[in-house]
Amino acid sequence: MSTIFNQENVGYSKAITRDFFKNVYGYMFAALTISGVVAYYAGILEVFSKYFVKADGSGLTPLFWIVSFAPVGLGLLIQMAYQRLSMILLLILFFIFSALMGLSLSSVMLMYSGNDIALTFFVTSGAFGGMAVLGYTTKTDLTKFGSLMYMGFIGIFIAGIANIWFQSDMMSLMIAIIGVFVFTGLTAYYMQSLKSIAQNKLMTEMDRAKLSLIGGLQLYILFINLFLSLLRIMGGRN
């Protein structure tokens, strides 16, 4: 009886874990799709110039900077307050976040060619997928490694903001190179963390549903940042 029970328990656990990650990747791909569509249409020169470039052509409008930094605040809100928010509200905020990210990425459509964007997307997918598998399958505890990578993420985030004023191409390249290592490392760390969450049998269905959305959001953010880092290295600006 004990053997049969253990086999059924393992099967139950695997089924829950599989469904959890199905939802995680579903949210991630939904966010990528929304952002991609919005970025494509907002990245049309006429549209971008109308809303994000000053009438005299002297620079970017305040709306551009609001759109660029709004996803940071909204992403933090979703991750920090998800327990107090309903699932419906979380979904609404998640889709708004994805659309805002698409708007903030619209400039990429004008700065780089379609071929560079497509090639970088496929390279990003390969690197991201490889590190995701590594993080899921490794037996090594990545907690300390993840903390180190998170510190690196904060560092390059601050450096990126500073470079808005310095406009240093060398600094931008260094941030991109470091970013590739940081975001691939964090991908492995978050996958291991999500695996642990998925296999937690004490979690309620609602918590599991919310955390699958949070997991999709986190992986989406890592994918986008890895994509942008690789694009700065591989792409030739128009």
Image (cartoon, rainbow, N blue to C red):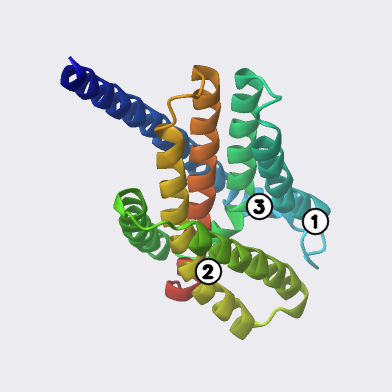
For marks 2 and 1 on the same chain, the one whose residue lies earlier in the sequence: 1
Question: Which circle, 2 or 3, is nearer the viewer?
Answer: 2
Indicate which label's residue lies in the foreground, 2 or 1. 2
Residue carrying label 2 = 179
Alpha-carbon span between mark 2 and mark 3:
27 Å
What kind of residue is marked 3?
Answer: Phe
Residue 119, given in percent of the width and then of the height, sits at 35, 62
Residue 237 visible: no
Identify the residue at image location x=60%, y=77%: 172
Pick the front one: 48 or 131: 131
**What separation in Å lies between label 1 and label 3 (alpha carbons)?**
10 Å
Dot 2 or dot 3: first in sequence order is 3
**Where residue 66 appears, x then y in whole percent?**
78, 50
The image shows residue 169 at horizontal and vertical percentages of 61, 82
Q: Which residue is mark 3?
A: 48
The answer, for residue 82, to whether it is visible in the render is yes
**Spatial distance from mark 2 to mark 1, Cα to Cα?**
28 Å
- The local secondary structure at tag 2 comes to helix
- In the picture as drawn, the residue positioned furthest to the bottom comes out as 170
Q: Residue at x 66, y 64 (%)?
A: 154
Residue 61 numbered mark, or none: 1
**SS of the residue at dot 3?**
helix
- The residue located at (71%, 33%) in the rendering is 81
The three-letter amino acid code for the residue at tag 1 is: Thr
The amino acid marked with disc number 2 is: Gly
Residue 47 shown left or right of residue 183 in the figure: right
- At 45% across and 62% down in the image, what residue appears? 185
Q: Where's the N terminus, which quadrant?
A: top left
